[in-house]
């Protein structure tokens, strides 16, 4: 992890650079596609989502005891459904790219135009966006 300074424009510019963005997203897709069939199943994506503990840690779900395991699984299935745009039970690379683009543009919008200092994980989309901006400025 590292501490970086970024704003919404950093993220938006990264998303708009189709080559850089798609390369990063495709790399994540390939890492998640453990059976190498070119599709992401719910178990392949769920293991990533659950390992990040997005809902339970960042939103305090497990600490508050608000949701049981079945309800938490339902929320993760809902997140998977957002990626599975055609509802066929699997996420292809185009669906993954499209949803990640929406997610990252939402992050850009939420960050706004004022720079913020943030801890980002190595290899994350935000870290790639920051590194890309730094390389362009050099």
Image (cartoon, grey):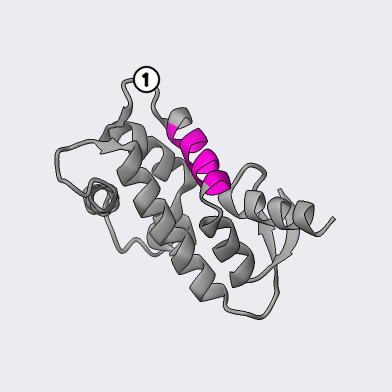
Q: Residue furthest right?
A: 138
Horizontal arrangement in the rendering, residue 119 relative to residue 107 (left or right): right
Q: Is 137 included in the stretch rendered in magenta?
A: no
Q: 10 Å neighbourhood of mark 1: few (<14), some, or many (≥20)?
A: few
Tell me residue 63's x, y (percent). Answer: 43, 60
Residue plotted at (27% across, 38% down): 91
Q: How many marks?
A: 1
Q: Which residue is mark 1?
A: 36
Q: Nearer the viewer, residue 122 or 103?
A: 103
Q: Nearer the viewer, residue 37 or 66?
A: 37
Horizontal arrangement in the rendering, residue 87 relative to residue 66 (left or right): left
Residue plotted at (70% across, 75% down): 115
Q: Nearer the viewer, residue 56 or 128?
A: 128
Horizontal arrangement in the rendering, residue 50 relative to residue 21 (left or right): left
With respect to residue 118, does 31 lie above or below?
above
Tell me residue 88's x, y (percent). Answer: 14, 39
Snapshot quadrant of residue 120:
bottom right
What are the residue bounds of the magenta stretch?
19-29
Q: Magenta: predominant secondary structure element?
A: helix
Tell me residue 55's x, y (percent). Answer: 40, 57
Residue plotted at (54% across, 45% down): 19
Image quadrant for the C terminus? bottom right
Tell me residue 54's x, y (percent). Answer: 44, 54
Indicate the secondary structure of the residue bearing disc 1.
Answer: loop
Snapshot quadrant of residue 64:
bottom left
With respect to residue 63, does 74 lie above or below?
above
Snapshot quadrant of residue 30:
top left
Q: Is 24 included in the stretch rendered in magenta?
A: yes
With respect to residue 8, does 23 lie above or below?
above
With respect to residue 13, does 68 lie above or below?
above
């Amino acid at each position: 992890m590292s501490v970086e300074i970024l704003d919404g424009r950093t993220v938006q510019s990264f998303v708009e650079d189709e080559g850089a963005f798609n390369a990063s997203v495709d790399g994540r897709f390939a890492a998640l596609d453990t059976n190498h069939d070119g599709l992401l199943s719910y178990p392949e994506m769920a293991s990533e989502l659950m390992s990040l503990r997005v809902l339970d840690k960042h939103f305090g779900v497990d600490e508050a005891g608000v949701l049981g395991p079945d309800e938490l699984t339902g929320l993760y299935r809902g997140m998977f459904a957002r990626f599975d745009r055609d509802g066929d039970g699997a996420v292809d690379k185009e669906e993954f790219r499209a949803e990640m683009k929406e997610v990252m543009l939402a992050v850009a919008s939420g960050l706004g135009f004022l720079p913020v200092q943030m801890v980002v994980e190595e290899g994350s989309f935000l870290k790639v966006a920051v590194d890309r901006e730094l390389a362009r400025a050099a």
